[in-house]
Image (cartoon, grey):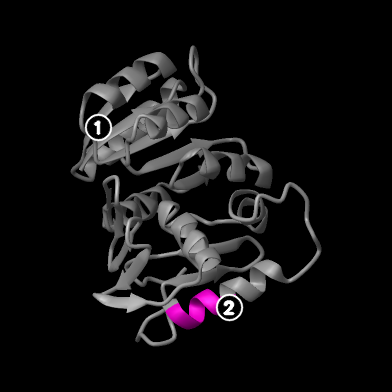
Amino acid sequence: MKLLLIEDDHETALYLSKGLRQAGHVVDVVGDGRDGLFLASSEVFDILIVDRRLPTIDGLSIVQTLRGAGSTVPILFLTTMSSVDARVEGLEAGGDDYLVKPFAFSELMARLNALSRRPPITHDDSCLRVGVLEMDFIRRTVKRSGQVLDLQPLEFRLLEYFLRHEGRIVTRTMLLERVWEFHFDPKTKVIEANISRLRAKLDKPFDRPLLHTARGAGYVLRADGGSN
């Protein structure tokens, strides 16, 4: 794979780039946020590895800028910021995974391999396709492996949000704010009830579930059917 490592700590960058190259990958390394954003915007990479705290432009802003420009390249945050809020912030900004320092190199490799196996997300003005799922915004239809799913409007919006965050943990707060547009917790089972109804249509008729519960965190849609 061709990787871009945006990391300002010289020792960490040297250690990671050496290990990744020994594993057979091509690695470009930059230590400045502005240079990293320029390189990520001008060249094609299979995966980006981005530190949160960087000179000139921070990692969060890099990812937000790339996603705003339509980039779908997988991005792994690598950072010392370990709080739940920091992780959620990184994932909401468009990161696909989040690894906290210090870490084992073997875990980094496992996460990179997992990101490389994710089905590509493709979309145009009318359709969103992720793995075996296809969402048509003009006809307001959803198909799994060619089979039409009969979704209600709220279920459609809920699945759309999961599709746009495929492979990432989606928290209850994210769903309340982005799907229901609640900026407070109504202290009801509204999310759980709708997730249950969506699963009955999305997963029950098929061999493998796509929508999984991330215990203590939220939910994750894996369009390849993989489990947590």
Report the residue at 73% width, 71% height from top.
189
Q: Is residue 70 left or right of residue 46?
A: right
Label 1: few (<14), some (14–19) or many (≥20) C-alpha neighbours in 10 Å: some
Vertical position of residue 2 compared to residue 84: above or below: above
Q: Nearer the viewer, residue 34 or 172?
A: 172
Q: Nearer the viewer, residue 157 or 220?
A: 157
Q: Nearer the viewer, residue 154 or 132?
A: 154
The reply to whether residue 189 is visible in this rendering is yes
Please tell me in which quadrant of the rendered image residue 31 appears.
top left
Report the residue at 63% width, 39% height from top.
86
Label 2: few (<14), some (14–19) or many (≥20) C-alpha neighbours in 10 Å: few
Please tell me in which quadrant of the rendered image residue 13 appears.
top left
Where residue 219 appears, x then y in whole percent?
55, 64
Assess whether residue 198 is covered by the magenta stretch: yes
From the image, give the main secondary structure of the stretch colored magenta.
Answer: helix
Cβ atoms at labels 1 and 2 below 8 Å apart: no
Give, as a single range, the part of the protein colored magenta. Answer: 196-201
Assess whether residue 165 is covered by the magenta stretch: no
- The residue at which mark 2 appears reads as 196
Structural distance between the alpha carbons of marks 1 and 2: 43 Å
> Mark 1 or mark 2: which is in front?
2
Mark linked to residue 27: 1
Residue at the top extreme? 56
Please tell me in which quadrant of the rendered image residue 209 appears.
bottom left
At mark 2, the secondary structure is helix
Vertical position of residue 228 compared to residue 98: above or below: below
Where residue 158 appears, x then y in whole percent?
52, 62
Point out the tag, 1 or 2, that comes first from the N-terminus.
1
Specify the amino acid type for callout 2. Answer: Ser
